[in-house]
Image: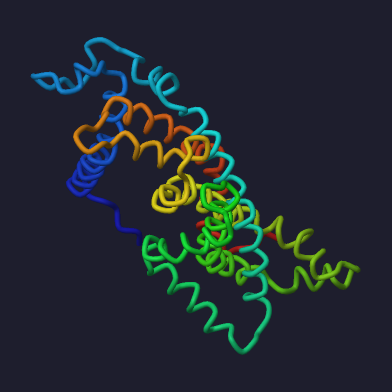
Amino acid sequence: MINQETMPARVTRILFLGVWLIITVFPLYWIIVTSFKTPGAIFSYPLTYWPEVFSIENYVGLFEKAQFGTYILNSLLISTVAAIFATLISMLSAYVLARFDFRTKGALLMAFLVTQMIPSFIALGPLYLMMVQLKLVDNKFGLILIYIAVCIPFSTVMLRGFFANVPDALEEAAMIDGCSRIGALFRVIVPVMKPGIVAAFIFNFVNCWNELFLSVTLMNRDSNKTIPTALNGFISSYNIDWGSMSAAAVLTIIPTMVLFAFASKYIVQGLTAGAVKG
């Protein structure tokens, strides 16, 4: 018999979720409100929770005073290219780890997991020296290469779990019908794995989109900077441009929100993957 939720328990749960929703959404609301305030109204007293006069001065200033359009294009280019290649490489490596047995398989998986426990800024020094020797400092291609390397370990471990849930019989049947192993992978397994692959791509894209330490260290010219680097530029030694920073943060959030909105179905399927429809 299924236990029915009592009214007090239901009210308590709804209240708790409502409070939690307010705590979660309020910072986003405050950033949006601040972005539409005039510079003088941001710290006005008494504090207002709604702009008395809506102003797009902060948004206009982003494109007049700074090359924010260039920063957005740089982030889109670097994040998209890095996410695509990292997902493709991770898919192939995860397939090998899921389908083949070899002596160092366990050690390799453990190494992938251990790398996720090490903060990325610890490797900034060696990475910078390596990029200097390769003459890839202040170069979009160099940053893309590093992002690909950073994204591969976790994506490989994640996609390996999806491959493990796909029966071997699917690709065996395709190979009997004349497909090569690579052909069976891309014609049979990849369509079944689409939710997991999309989830891995979104994870890689968001990681690259939000990354700060590497981009600040490696990118110096304004023509090569990404959005996180631009946001960091609004903080000076004696002042923080809260209006411009809030407007930039709103514009930064929009692409990821659109991406999640269009791919939400695949994300849910990818996170709950495990059953194969016949």
Decide which of 49, 78 is in the foreground and name it.
78
Residue 156 percent location from the top left of the image: 57, 66
Residue 84, percent from left and from top? 63, 51
- Return the residue found at the far right: 178
Marker count (numbered): 0
Query: Can the viewer see residue 271 in this picture?
Result: yes
Residue 32 vs residue 153: left or right? left
Which residue is at the front of the view, 222 or 62? 222
Q: Is residue 211 above or below residue 116?
A: above
- Image position of 96 (left or right of 140): right
Q: Is residue 269 visible?
A: no
Residue plotted at (8% across, 19% down): 46
Q: Residue furthest left?
A: 46
Quarter where residue 65 is shown: top left
Toward the bottom, the furthest residue is 103
> Along the horizontal axis of the image, is 126 left or right of 5?
right
Above-or-below relation of 24 to 165: above
Q: Position of residue 9 (x, y in %)?
A: 20, 49
In this picture the colour scheme is: rainbow
* Quadrant of the snapshot with the C terminus: bottom right
Q: Position of residue 18 (x, y in %)?
A: 24, 39
Image quarter of the N terminus: bottom left
- What residue do we see at 57% from left, 48% from top? 266
Measuring 61% from the left and 57% from the top, which residue is drawn there?
Answer: 87
Q: Relative to residue 224, is residue 60 depicted above or below?
A: above
